[in-house]
Image: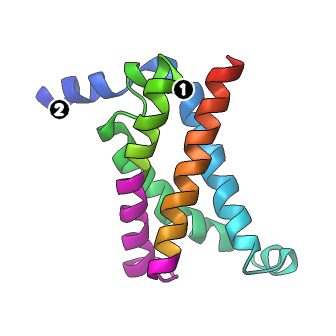
Amino acid sequence: MADSSFLATRLDRDAVPLAIGDLIALIVLLTVGTLNHVTVEFLSANPLYLLGVYAPFLIGWALVAPLIGAYSAGAVETAKSSVPLVIRSWIPAAVVGLALRHFVFRGSAALTFAVVMLVLGSIALGGWRALYFKLR
């Protein structure tokens, strides 16, 4: 029973637009990053390739973000509360994603790649949320 009440405080129905935007921001980030290393022709010839790129980071996000509070009631109040929550959620989620990428999926978790993912993921998620609250 304690687990359901813990998650109940971490998941707010009003955060659905944030969750959708976060997923789009991560997919765009990962797609653009992939296109810096492979061609569109390669992706066209290997339609499942991007799923292998997305999977470790989206799994990490799905596991960590609710626990940290990325979709809590506080996350839907203001950019001032939402942006720090999404960045605090991304850092450990990216670490989980990097570990999954290294040990389960294809790809390395080189230090430079890890730094790029931590920084650009924070910018993408924080920037999207700041824009959301500015336009809301």
Identify the amino acid type marked 1.
Val
Q: Residue furthest left?
A: 2
- In the rendered image, residue 76 lying in the magenta stretch gets the answer no
Query: What residue is drawn where x is 17% and y is 32%?
Result: 3
Is residue 117 visible in the rendered image? The answer is yes
**Left or right, 112 with reference to 124:** left
Is residue 109 visible in the rendered image? The answer is no
Q: Depth check: give the residue in front, 112 or 4.
A: 112
Sequence-first tag of 1 and 2? 2
Residue 50 position, x and y percent, is 66, 68
Look at the image and give the residue range highlighted in magenta. Answer: 91-112
Q: How is the image coloured?
A: rainbow
- Please tell me in which quadrant of the rendered image residue 19 appears: top right
Query: What residue is drawn where x is 68% and y is 68%?
Result: 33
**Left or right, 18 with reference to 60:** right
Q: Secondary structure at mark 1?
A: helix
Res. 16 mark: 1
